């Protein structure tokens, strides 16, 4: 609209037009970001103003990722409720498809910062909280904290004396599915599937090698269907990491038996199944080449296998320069 305005006939005015488009969001979020101080002081008028700001924020219709980032920049990273507010602003957007894909990246970055702030401020070194989660008889406080975080799309787990926070991709998808592009819907559904883990037709957990194989298939399918997706580089990196783990083994599930140096049955069975089920995939060419090399060595480890692993190119051909 501004390009048709008489005010935009001069070069100077046009140069500042992007800022003018974002200015209302900056003014609103600047006011909103200061609300916490008013709340803690118990000032009734400040609480009313904060409520008004929340309503205004939920009614914003950002037109671009730049405008969305302006809103996110004004939100306090120490307030979990701002994750939900960021989702509301996203769901009301008026952006084009490319901007919406970029907005998902912006939201993901924002959510991760909020989780990091919560972990640092509320959980790191918090012995009282650790005691609550280690208490098997009284789970009241542990459930309370877990439920609180779940309300904001955060999965909390406690293992070996430490806390782990992860985004609940299903939560994000449920809030945004109506405005996401097809590619971003597929991305969040893929992440949700990966987070749940993989089971066989009898609902039994897959072996570590078969789980890796399934991840390769999932990301390979995604890259084939969404070659220009905004997160293609990150997805390719995940694919390469999983592919490398599949043909080199995991620390908790080694490729070769430590005592005999022979290929473990779990990996051998998985490789054979992969080659049979997916004969025409690009990834299968790598798996088959590696398996044939193993067979030529009697399925026993030797240094020639290390050379293969260091020299093989795992980058999908459609993404190679």
Image (spheres, helix red, strand yellow):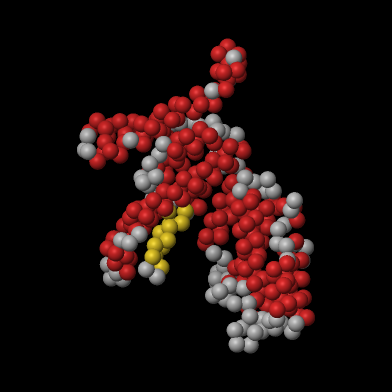
Q: Quadrant of residue 254?
A: bottom right
Residue 26 falls in which quadrant of the image? top left
Residue 190 in picture, x, y percent from top left: 58, 55
Q: How many callouts does the rendering have?
A: 0
* Place of residue 201 in the rendered image (x, y in percent of width and height, measured from the top left): 60, 69
- Compared across the picture, whether 242 is left or right of 117 comes to right
Above or below — where is 292 with respect to 78?
Answer: below
Residue 81 in which image quadrant: top left
Q: Is residue 282 above or below residue 225?
A: below
Q: Furthest residue to the bottom?
A: 260
Left or right: 163 with respect to 135?
right
- Residue at 63% in and 77% down: 255
| Horizontal side, residue 248 vs residue 92: left or right | right
238, above or below 74, in the image: below
Q: Does the rendering let one see residue 276? A: no
Residue located at (68% from left, 45% from top): 228
Task: Judge whether residue 306 can be spotted in this image.
Answer: yes
Is the residue 120 above or below the residue 248 in the image?
above
The x, y position of residue 59, in whole percent, is 43, 31
Residue occupying image coordinates x 71% and y 76%: 305
Q: Residue at x 29, y 69 (%)?
A: 135
Residue 111 lies, in percent from the top left, at 45, 48
Q: Quadrant of the N terminus?
A: top right
Q: Nearer the viewer, residue 155 or 300?
A: 300
């Amino acid at each position: 609209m501004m390009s048709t305005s008489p005010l935009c006939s001069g070069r100077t005015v046009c140069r500042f037009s992007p800022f003018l488009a974002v200015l209302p969001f900056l003014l609103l979020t600047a006011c909103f970001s200061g609300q916490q101080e008013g709340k803690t002081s118990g000032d009734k008028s400040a609480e009313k103003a904060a409520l008004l700001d929340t309503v205004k924020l939920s009614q914003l219709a950002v037109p671009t990722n730049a405008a969305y980032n302006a809103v996110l920049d004004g939100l306090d990273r120490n307030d979990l409720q701002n994750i939900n507010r960021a989702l509301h602003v996203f769901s009301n957007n008026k952006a084009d498809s490319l901007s919406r894909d970029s907005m998902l990246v912006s939201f993901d970055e924002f959510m991760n910062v909020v989780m990091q702030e919560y972990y640092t401020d509320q959980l790191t070194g918090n012995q009282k909280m650790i005691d609550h989660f280690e208490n098997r008889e009284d789970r009241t406080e542990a459930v309370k904290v877990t439920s609180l975080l779940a309300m904001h799309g955060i999965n909390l787990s406690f293992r070996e004396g430490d806390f782990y926070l992860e985004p609940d991709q299903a939560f994000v998808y449920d809030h945004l599915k109506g405005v996401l592009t097809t590619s971003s819907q597929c991305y969040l559904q893929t992440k949700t599937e990966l987070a749940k883990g993989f089971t066989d037709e009898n609902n039994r957990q897959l072996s570590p090698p078969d789980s890796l194989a399934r991840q390769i298939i999932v990301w390979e399918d995604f890259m084939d269907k969404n070659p220009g997706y905004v997160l293609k580089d990150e997805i390719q990196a995940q694919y390469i990491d999983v592919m490398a783990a599949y043909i080199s083994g995991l620390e908790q599930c080694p490729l070769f038996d430590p005592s005999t140096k022979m290929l473990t049955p779990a990996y051998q069975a998985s490789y054979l199944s992969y080659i049979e089920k997916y004969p025409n995939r690009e990834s299968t060419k790598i798996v088959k080449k590696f398996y044939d090399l193993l067979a030529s060595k009697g399925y026993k480890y030797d240094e020639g296998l290390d050379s293969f692993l260091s020299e093989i190119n795992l980058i999908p051909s459609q993404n190679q320069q």
